[in-house]
Amino acid sequence: MLQAFIHWNPDPTIAALGPVTLRWYGVLFMTGFALGYWVTARMFKAEKAPSEWLDWLLLTMIFGALIGARLGHVFFYNWAYYQDHPAEIPMIWKGGLASHGASVTLLLGLWLFSKLVSKKPMSWVMDRMAVSIPLGGGFIRLGNLMNSEILGSPTEQPWGFIFGRLGEPFARHPAQLYESLTYFAIFGVLLWLYWRTGIKDRPLALSGWFMVLVFGARFILEFWKEKQEVIENESLRTFLDPLTMGQWLSIPLVLLGTGMLIYAYRKPAPAAG
């Protein structure tokens, strides 16, 4: 029966040269950022926004995403471990990033960018970045797949993955792949909305769709994932059940996105030209 499943056991390291190690996770992470940068550059060029804004925006996105996503993973999902191993908190190359944490620091970074660099309303840059962020998220989840982390729940479906590094005799849902493909699809939808409709003239509309689609999908996909959080407090664990930490954190973000959409569509569409 095991032959019916996909046996998955890639080496997460591409190459090592002395103390320098090239890992799939890092390569895929930076690939997502590079492609997101290119997409954003196309939008900026079409709207005649200054090209030098992109350099500041790239720094904002990289540091905001890394810091927030790492701290989100540490405090929301595995504080029971990191409180005893604080030196490992900066070790992002080992994996462990949470999109919910990144959303907080990215909003702060975009607010600073709007105030100090672009001088445009924060909604303007939020809507442009909302298009490309799911693209980066898709590549990050592929990196998780190469690391054999962010695991799915056990399955008997023939497309289940047996993760060789874990030494388990059963298959799991490839939840990393589910999530990656979902984010790529959302990127395609948002890109189409930006280029083929007048949605960019509705402040917060693209941001609202991003929140609803990404975190709504995250809420649903959590049903096929193992719980990632490590919670020692019995009362807190009982309170969170039967939902996961990822689902609880997704709910307010979906509601925030819904509010953005109501705000964006409260008035008739702007006149063309």
Image: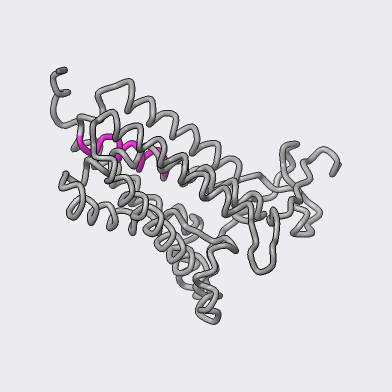
Question: How many marks on residues?
Answer: 0
Q: Residue at x 69, y 49 (%)?
A: 154
User: Does residue 80 belong to the magenta stretch?
Assistant: no
Residue sticking out furthest to the bottom: 84
Give the farthest residue toward the top.
272
Q: Main secondary structure of the magenta part?
A: helix
Quadrant assignment, res 84: bottom right
Compared across the picture, whether 152 is left or right of 49 comes to right
Q: Residue at x 75, y 47 (%)?
A: 8
Magenta-span inclusion, residue 213: yes
- x, y percent for residue 162: 76, 49
Image quarter where the C terminus lies is top left
Quarter the N terminus occupies = top right
Position of residue 166 measured from the top left corner of the image (x, y, whole percent): 74, 59
Relative to 88, 161 lies left or right: right
Q: Is residue 216 visible?
A: no
Q: 37 or 273: nearer the eye?
A: 37
Give the image location of residue 257, x and y in percent. Answer: 30, 43
Q: Nearer the viewer, residue 48 or 85?
A: 48
Is residue 269 at least partly visible in the picture? yes
The boundaries of the magenta stretch are 203-214
Residue 259, given in percent of the width and then of the height, sits at 24, 42
Along the horizontal axis of the image, is 141 left or right of 192?
right
Residue drawn at 24 percent across, 40 percent down? 50
